Image (tube, helix red, strand yellow):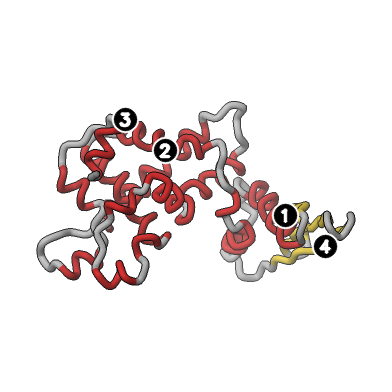
Amino acid sequence: MTIFDFLDEHHIKHHNSKLIEQAFIHSSYVNEHKGSYHDNERLEFMGDAVLQIYSALRLYQIKPELKEGLMSTRRANLVCEKGLAKIVREFELNKFLKLGQGEEKSGGRDRDSIISDMFEAFIGAVYLDTNIKNVYKLLDILMLKHIKETDESIFDYKTKLQEYVQADSRKSIDYELIYEKGPSNKPEFKVAVKIDNLIYGYGIGTTKKQAQKNAAKNALEKLAGNDEI
């Protein structure tokens, strides 16, 4: 099966075979075939832009309507490296990837960073080859079921909150245990996340780590449209 068989099977239009094939060519493959191929990095840039607007549109269309903060975190889940790699594996798109021998031997065909970049390049190629309507049809096949059921386990809210706050290095983030209750086999923890000693969110979980993650998520959703931080 080729990538063109995959597209035909799902009734996705395509015209420029070289452009579609380029989406699956990693730079390591190009380095081993000097002058014969072009890598997928420019297509990756285009695909990233298409994915941002597609995911924003589909999240905006969800009923009942989602708040801006929740849409932001869900979109981040969908188009982050691990999120896209998950979709690639689900549809086995990485079997079409062309890698250099060294990259192949080191496990590049299943590396999140490589296959997520490949996915973005694939979307960019289909868009450039046809039109936005056609690429949205493809993305609905690949991603629509994940729009409402975003896997939050792939998203590191504590890291994301840290990155959000790092714009002002003077601010500090601390997690404070509010309470711990319940039996040892089924405990419950409640944590508050503080930024410069002000509480920005709360989280509950069966472990301290889970409670901290949920507190960070709560804070991120509140801060998404806030220009004060």
Q: Is residue 175 left or right of residue 1?
A: right
Q: Which residue is mark 4?
A: 177
C-alpha span from label 3 to label 2: 11 Å
- At 80% across and 63% down in the image, what residue appears? 176
Quarter that holds the N terminus:
top left
| Residue 202 in sight from this viewpoint | no
Q: Secondary structure at mark 1?
A: helix
Task: Specify which label sits upstream in the sequence, 2 or 4.
Answer: 2
Residue that badge 2 annotates: 54
The picture places residue 2, in percent across and down from the top left corner, at 23, 45
Tag of residue 215: 1
SS label for mark 2: helix
Which residue lies under the disc numbered 3?
133
Task: Identify the mark nearer the N-term, 1 or 2.
Answer: 2
Within-10-Å neighbours for mark 3: few <14, some 14–19, many 20+: few
Q: Amino acid at mark 4?
A: Leu
